Amino acid sequence: MKIKNYTTAVPWVRTVHEIEQLLTKYGATKLMKHYHGDGRIEAIFFEINGMAYKLPSNSARCAELLQKEYPRRRKQAIEEQSERIVWRVIKDWIDAQMSLIHIGQVELQEIFLPYATDGTQTLYQKLKESNYTGLLTTEPEIKQSVKLEERKG
């Protein structure tokens, strides 16, 4: 399977700007970028309706996939393309999700809740760190719930 946007030539800086425009169009009141030491952006933080979100970028994972598909390409070319791809995919994802919100199919929190942040960790990171304790229902609880539903019906 080909990686989405694997041929993009759009500079990642322009795509990040487009992401910022999308977020503000849909109500973001604050935007912040967190940079790697080499000038690339590691994450975009934004706030909508008083809730903060962090959208991370991990171009290194994309570079690993590209390197497997194109083993003869130079490492630097792979890294640069990965940066372009990752931000382009994130932009497309945000655009699609915001469109669903706009047409009333979902609420913002349904889509972005895993990315809600306290400034250091996202909700997803906290849940993963706790091994999702208390979140997932065990099989006996599911069976009991089904029995209760059957009795009501």
Image: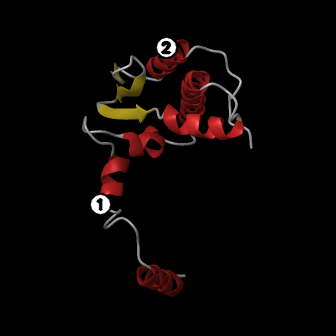
Vertical relation: 36 (above or below) 126: above
Quadrant hosting residue 46: top left
Quadrant showing the C terminus:
bottom right
| Residue nearest the viewer, comparing 82 with 99 | 82
**Residue 140, percent across and down?**
43, 85
The residue at which mark 2 appears reads as 17
**Residue 108, percent across and down?**
45, 38
Quadrant hosting residue 130: bottom left
Of labels 2 and 1, earlier in sequence is 2
Q: Is residue 140 visible?
A: yes
**Residue 149, percent across and down?**
50, 80
Vertical relation: 124 (above or below) 146: above
Q: Is residue 103 visible?
A: no
**Residue 71, percent across and down?**
68, 35
| Residue nearest the viewer, comparing 86 with 145 | 86
The residue at which mark 1 appears reads as 130
Quadrant showing the N terminus:
top right
Instruction: Give me the residue at 46% from left, 81% from top.
Output: 139
Residues under numbered marks 2 and 1 in contact, where contact means CB atoms less than 8 Å apart: no
Instruction: Give me the residue at 68% from left, 29% from top.
Output: 6
Circle 1: element type: loop
Would residue 4 be found to the left or right of residue 113 on screen?
right
